[in-house]
Image (cartoon, grey):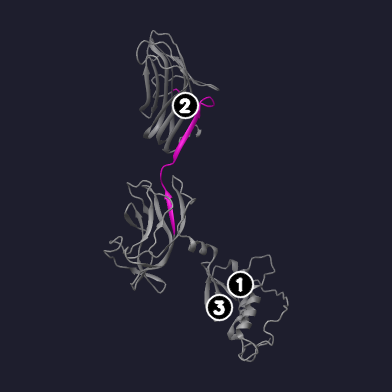
Amino acid sequence: MAPKADNRFQMPAVINPPSRICVTIEVPDDATHWANFWGALDELAQGRSYFEGGPGSIKQVIQVWRDVLLKVQLDTCKPAPFGSQSMEVDLGSPLRIDCDCNVFITCCDGTEKQILTADQIKLLLATQPGAGTPQPKPGGGCQEYNGTIIGAQQWLLPSPVNTGDVLTLESTDGASNQSGGLSWQCPDGSTYFAGLCGTPAGTSSSNLDPTRPTGMLLWKINSVYYATTSPLTVPSGVADLPAVLVLNYNPTVAVNGTIAFVAKACNNQPVAWCRFLDFTLNNFGFLGQAPCTVPAGTWVPGSGWTTQDVNPTPGVNSREICISTNFAAATTVTDIDLFIDYTSGSGTAAGNQAQAVVVGSTAVIQNLFNVEPTGTGIHLTWHGSLASITAVTLAISTSIGTGLAFSGSARIRSLTMKGVGAVPTQGVPC
């Protein structure tokens, strides 16, 4: 097929022959050569390249060559030259990819239509996340969600929010319009015209939030509206409440258009922790130290912490355990579970025997008796909340008194601590 004097091709006698010829061509490995090569081939699939009046339809010839070009393969192990170019790429016929990875196809009339990528289709179809949606983890974990609002729909953030959490719209796209109105609004409430977002729209007393621009995308938390144009730190007084995205229009009037977005939720709630200390395996950093008046106790591998005979003051005999540990960082303690074995010793007055757990400077467990209950696996427990804690003290005595013989026995078997915030290093996760 040869072009005539005006460089247009003749119409072939057979529009679509039943057979094909396979041709291998070496193209110079250069971006400009590559673009010129595809541009030359593209002329075979353009209506302007053919003379009218041939035996067949120009559209039929164009379609034949489009089918041929769609099946072109690179016979090389190297990446195609256009893969590394940081510019808009024209692949010739019929595809074009721009710098934002948008893909377009050229139609027979010369117009282009965009072909959606898998990610763009996912974003378009993403409306309201449901069961099984991933949640942001406490302690600063973040999770992104794709969403779409069509018309006057609302969109529910799939994770509840609390004071201190941060909500951000990573990206937005689209425009909306109140039915009957002439103006269209971008997600930030500015006026949409000719593909651009311009000046902010006005406000209206009939909008959900009369103080913010009409059509602005808003967060709604606990019946209060917040702008989405900057990251929102959830204010005080919010605990496990839903956050909803809405468009700022009169709720009684229909809304046109579609808004697509990517919302990010960061969970800044303290991390809940639980630490288990099996004292038969390790002393876990507990020592006879302050705040114990007289540090006491012996750690025995395979047994745990056992009593020691001490003299708090001259003439006073005490058989006891008093041990303490310090945390690397202040934290909040909410639960204590202590398991002990205990055999009462001698004593004649209340307080001669004691069982105590001190969290920080607060005695959360304090049993002062003349004769304590005797047994194995005795469970001492407390539930509450104490903040800014840096130490825990365990104190057990089986006998104490002036001139009394050392008597009784005790063993601390295990301790479980729970809380929120900085995680203590003592013990292992529950």
How far is mark 2 from mark 1, CA to CA? 70 Å
Q: Is residue 5 above or below residue 202?
A: below
Q: Which residue appears at 40% of the width and 32% of the height? A: 390
Q: Judging from the image, what secondary structure is the residue with disc 2 in?
A: loop
How far is mark 2 from mark 3, CA to CA? 78 Å
Q: Which mark is residue 107?
A: 3
* CA neighbours of label 1 inside 10 A, class few (<14), some (14 to 19), many (20+): some
Residue 426 at least partly seen: no
- Residue 171 percent across, percent down from the top left: 44, 61
- For the N terminus, the quadrant is bottom right
**Badge 2 or badge 3: first in the primary sequence:** 3
Highlighted range, magenta = 262-288
Q: Is residue 115 above or below residue 284?
A: below
Q: Nearer the viewer, residue 378 or 345?
A: 378
Instruction: Please state which amino acid type lies under the numbered disc 3.
Output: Cys
* CA neighbours of label 3 inside 10 A, class few (<14), some (14 to 19), many (20+): few
Residue position marked by numbered label 2 in the rendering: 286
Q: Which residue appears at 32% of the width and 56% of the height? A: 225
Residue position marked by numbered label 1 in the rendering: 31
Q: Is residue 281 magenta?
A: yes
Q: Which residue appears at 44% of the width and 28% of the height? A: 337
**Badge 3 or badge 1: first in the primary sequence:** 1
Instruction: Please state which amino acid type lies under the numbered disc 1.
Output: Ala
Choose mark 2 or mark 3, whichever is in front.
3
Q: Nearer the viewer, residue 267 or 35?
A: 267
